[in-house]
Every structure is written in structure tokens, then in C-alpha cells.
């Protein structure tokens, strides 16, 4: 009781020390702050995130319009769109890198969607040891892409690798794998599929568990076989989840760098056989110190990712 009286006394003294206009102003501010409290609390994080996106993008755009080279602190001058003209007419390195980027991204997405859906359908059913199988499937996600790349580089080594040793045991002979100019890109795609299919499986499995079983049971009663139920019931209902999985993996696959660099090194190999846009831009920056040209490649690459995101988002809305 004494505490309550003391609190009321302090409140009265505080009010008495302010004019009516100040009290009214504080009241209006309190109402406004309470009404917009979710934005007030989120504002610092939003400002920090926007700053971390806008500043690097603006600086990269600025460098792409200059002849920056040799050193970041070296004198540079505006050459406007000369870098863009030079890059877009480069048929020796730039356009082959674009081609490899699209082939790598499209190939791994298709393979991961097919394998991920197949594994998710199997894991959807209850069987003995299901928990152990799910844990085993997730193991590739534990390692970093660099460690995965180095591991598979040893496995595919033409001299001491177990892959060619096992092929020799069945009479198929040695295969170049990462050493071949025509097989290196496909091999790196195989490694990426091995590592990231579990993530696609998790996304699709989560979507499958939310589907109502009544529709599938009704289709089964009507005489539809397993393939017909999957094609006409499960697949249409899973379209939004599949779109999300494609969007996430597509953006991530477009940005793949560490796996390619760990397996083939600078330049994507001796013949640039796995040189994607990321590897190409890295080489321009840190091998040749062509910061202006490298920034141009990154801006074009960023535009490519934005276009891909827009197309996938439109597809998701239509689905």
C-alpha cells in the first residue's frame, strides 16, 4: 500500500513539473510509438541490412564505370560503358562462362528436383529404420563445399583415386572425371547434386507431409495407379513447394564458387572448363587486378540473378 501511494506521488510530481502542452505532446508520441512499435523495433536491423546491400552494390556499379585496375587506391577515371561493351563482345571468356553458368545451374536443379522428389516420396512412407536413413541422407549437408570439393577431388584423382580403381575392377578402364576438358563440368555438377539433394529432399518432404491423404485415397479408390496419382494429384498440389525449392536452389547454384575453385583451382582449370561467371569475376579481380572489368561482370551477373528470381516468382504466383 505504501509503495502504491509513493508511486502515485512521484507520478503527480512528474506531471506537475510539465506544462499541459508538453504532457499532450508526450501522450501523442506514446500513442504513435505504440501504434508503430513493430516498425520501430525492426528499424535498426532493416537499416543495417539495406546499408549492407546498397553500399556494395553502389560501389560495384561505380567501379564498373571506371578503368580501375592494378590497385584499389590507384587513380581511376570514368569510361562509362566501355567495360560493358568490352565484356558483352568477349566471345572467348565471358559468353562461354555464361553458358557454363546456365548449364551448371539448370543441370543441377533438374537432377536435384528429380532425385529429391523420389527420395522424399520414399521417406514419406513409414518403415523400419526411417530415422537412421533420414540422418544418413543429411550427412552431405554437414561438410562445407570446400571440404566436399577436396574430398571428391581425391576420389576422382586419376592416379590414386578409388573411383578409377573400382572402374578398373569391372573392366571399364580409367575415366578422366575432373581431369578431362569435356567431363570436368559434368563431374562438378555430380558433386553439387550429391551435396545439395538432401536440402531439396527436406523441402519437398515438408510439402508432402502437409498434403491431405483423402484426395490420394479417393483417386486410388477410383482406380488410379501410383503414377497417375502422382502425376495428376501429388504433383499439382506440390507445385508451390517445388517452385520454392527451385527458387532457393537456383539462386544458390548460380552463385556456386567454392566447390568449383576447390576442385579445379584458378580459372576453372587449365582450359577454363568449369569457369562460370563467379570464377571468371574472381580471376579478373584477384589474378589480373582488373577491378573495373570484374565489377562489370558482377553487375551483369547480378542482373541475371534478378531476372531469374523474377521469372521464378511469376511462375510461383501462377502456380
Image (cartoon, grey):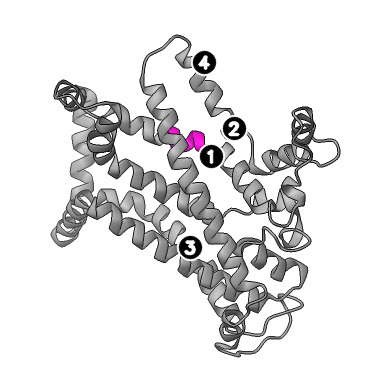
Residue sitting at x 67%, y 75%? 92
The quadrant in which the N terminus is found is top left
Question: Relative to the observer, which residue lies in front, 18 or 172?
Answer: 172
Query: Which residue in the structure is indicated by mark 1?
Result: 196
**Residue interval drawn in magenta:** 196-202
Q: Going from the N terminus, do you reach mark 4 or mark 2 first?
A: 4
Residue sitting at x 21%, y 41%? 11
Is residue 198 magenta-colored? yes
Q: Secondary structure at mark 1?
A: helix
Mark 1 or 3: the one toward you: 1
Q: Residues within 10 Å of mark 4 (few under 14, many from 20)?
A: few
The answer to whether residue 297 is left or right of residue 130 is right
Query: Which residue in the structure is indicated by mark 4?
Result: 132
The reply to whether the C-beta atoms of the residues labelled 1 and 2 are less than 8 Å apart is yes
The answer to whether residue 33 is left or right of residue 92 is left
**Count of numbered marks:** 4
Relative to 228, does residue 34 appear above or below in the rendering? below
Q: Residues within 10 Å of mark 3 (few under 14, many from 20)?
A: few
Q: CA distance from mark 1 to mark 2?
A: 7 Å
Q: CA distance from mark 4 to mark 2?
A: 14 Å
Q: Secondary structure at mark 2?
A: helix
* Percent of width and height locating residue 35: 19, 51
Amino acid at each position: 500500500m505504501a509503495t502504491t501511494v509513493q508511486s502515485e506521488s512521484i507520478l503527480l510530481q512528474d506531471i506537475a513539473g510539465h506544462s499541459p502542452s508538453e504532457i499532450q505532446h508526450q501522450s501523442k508520441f506514446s500513442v504513435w510509438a505504440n501504434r508503430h512499435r513493430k516498425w520501430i523495433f525492426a528499424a535498426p536491423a532493416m537499416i543495417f541490412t539495406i546499408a549492407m546491400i546498397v553500399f556494395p552494390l553502389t560501389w560495384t556499379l561505380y567501379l564498373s564505370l571506371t578503368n580501375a585496375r592494378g590497385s584499389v587506391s590507384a587513380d581511376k577515371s570514368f569510361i562509362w560503358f566501355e567495360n560493358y561493351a568490352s565484356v558483352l563482345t568477349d566471345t572467348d571468356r565471358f559468353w562461354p562462362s555464361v553458358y557454363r553458368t546456365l548449364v551448371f545451374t539448370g543441370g543441377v536443379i533438374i537432377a536435384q528436383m528429380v532425385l529429391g522428389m523420389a527420395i522424399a516420396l520414399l521417406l514419406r512412407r513409414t518403415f523400419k529404420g526411417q530415422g537412421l536413413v533420414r540422418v544418413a541422407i543429411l550427412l552431405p549437408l554437414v561438410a562445407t563445399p570446400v571440404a566436399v570439393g577436396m574430398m571428391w577431388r581425391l576420389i576422382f584423382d586419376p592416379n590414386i583415386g578409388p573411383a578409377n580403381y573400382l572402374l578398373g575392377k569391372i573392366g571399364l578402364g580409367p575415366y578422366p572425371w575432373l581431369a578431362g576438358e569435356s567431363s570436368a563440368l559434368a563431374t562438378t555438377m555430380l558433386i553439387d547434386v550429391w551435396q545439395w539433394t538432401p536440402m531439396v529432399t527436406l523441402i519437398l518432404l515438408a510439402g508432402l507431409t502437409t498434403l491431405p491423404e483423402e484426395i490420394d485415397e479417393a483417386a486410388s479408390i477410383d482406380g488410379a495407379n501410383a503414377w497417375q496419382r502422382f502425376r495428376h494429384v501429388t504433383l499439382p498440389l506440390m507445385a508451390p513447394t517445388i517452385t520454392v525449392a527451385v527458387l532457393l536452389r537456383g539462386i544458390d547454384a548460380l552463385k556456386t564458387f567454392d566447390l568449383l575453385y576447390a576442385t579445379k583451382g584458378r580459372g576453372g582449370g587449365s582450359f577454363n572448363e568449369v569457369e562460370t561467371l563467379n570464377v571468371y569475376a574472381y580471376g579478373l579481380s584477384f589474378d589480373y587486378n582488373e577491378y573495373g572489368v570484374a565489377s562489370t561482370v558482377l553487375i551483369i551477373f547480378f542482373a541475371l540473378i534478378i531476372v531469374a528470381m523474377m521469372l521464378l516468382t511469376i511462375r510461383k504466383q501462377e502456380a
